[in-house]
Amino acid sequence: MASKLSLTSALTLPNSKYKIPHIGFGVYQSPLSTCVNSCLTAITAGYRHIDTAQYYANETSVGRAVRDSSVSRSELYITTKILSPGKDIESTYKSIEDSVEKLDGKNGYVDLFLIHSPNGGKESRKLMWQALEKAKANGKVRDIGVSNYGVGHIEEIKEFGQVWPPAVNQIELHPWCQQREAVEYCKKNNIVVEAYCPIVRNQKVDDKTLNEIANKHKTSPNQVLIRYALEKGWVPLPKSDSPKRIEKNADVYGFELDVKDMEILDGLDQGKSGAIVQAVSNVPS
């Protein structure tokens, strides 16, 4: 287990000179009216990594928060995602370029750009990956990766991609959905694993086992879940629009989970049935 973690901890990305902060702030379903303030609260609390997506329809709000923050752009790490391609590489690239402009202006960049889902089929995945490679080559994007990809989807990139492995695979991860095959594959290939829904959208806040561990450490269930993800070497992306919860979710460095705690939490795995959003398919379709 990692014992010297801090809010400034970062992980090395494959074939990259850049590092990714070991914890990120998610903004899924953060309304436009609150997204800017939530991001600014997160940055003030010490987060340096914000994770958005075209599908979330709040890239412009994240971009405004980045500009309004007292923290310089070079110290912030911005991730977004593309869900579906245009009719060709050029139109797909334009979609990526539009996201970059919303987040960091016409001459800006995005630190990490992901394919949001493999569900559109092989040709869709190919178009998006090749457009992301172009954006990387043109300096619009520093690193590229994937989300919700299983083993087969990542292997498939070798058929048409010039960039491999992807820097990141962002998948649903928490004690009830550990996706061990995909995680082990990523680890073997030095692909950083990001954990979305690390606090299970508060659905497990009353879980008896989780609360026993939280009480033992005099902390909250959600803090235990975030610390669990960190100890596993994943990059958790907790989301909240409550200022107090945003701050609390970043306050996970004053305690450590011991071997027994980790074994107990590991034992909660329900496989694919434990997913609340989407478990990956390791065989591409």
Image (spheres, helix red, strand yellow):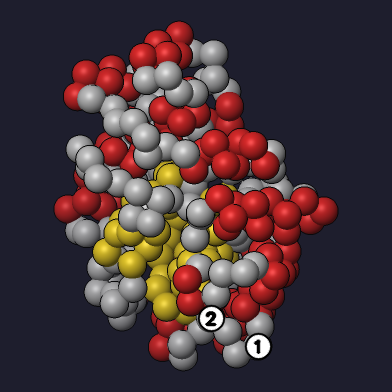
**Mark 1 residue type:** Lys
Q: Quadrant of residue 257?
A: top left
Report crowding for label 1: few under 14, some 14 to 19, many 20 or more residues within 10 A (C-alpha): few
| Position in image of residue 98 (x %, y %) | 66, 79
Residue 194 visible (yes or no): no
Q: Measured along the vertical axis of the image, is residue 226 above or below residue 73?
A: above
Dot 1 falls on a residue whose secondary structure is: loop
Quadrant position of the N terminus in the picture = top left
On the rendered structure, is 197 left or right of 35?
A: left
On the rendered structure, is 40 left or right of 11?
A: right
**Mark 2 residue type:** Tyr
Q: Measured along the vertical axis of the image, is residue 215 above or below residue 146?
A: above
| Position in image of residue 86 (x %, y %) | 62, 75
Q: Residue at x 77, y 51 (%)?
A: 34
Report crowding for label 2: few under 14, some 14 to 19, many 20 or more residues within 10 A (C-alpha): many
* Labelled disc at residue 106: 1
* Labelled disc at residue 109: 2
Dot 2 falls on a residue whose secondary structure is: loop
Q: State the residue in front, 142 or 164.
A: 142
Q: Measured along the vertical axis of the image, is residue 82 above or below residue 264?
A: below
| Position in image of residue 244 (x %, y %) | 64, 37
Total numbered labels placed on residues in the image: 2
Q: State the residue in front, 92 or 67.
A: 67
| Position in image of residue 194 (x %, y %) | 40, 50
Q: CA distance from mark 1 to mark 2?
A: 9 Å
Q: Residue at x 69, y 39 (%)?
A: 242
Q: Residue at x 51, y 54 (%)?
A: 46
Residue 184 visible (yes or no): yes
Q: Residue at x 23, y 25 (%)?
A: 258
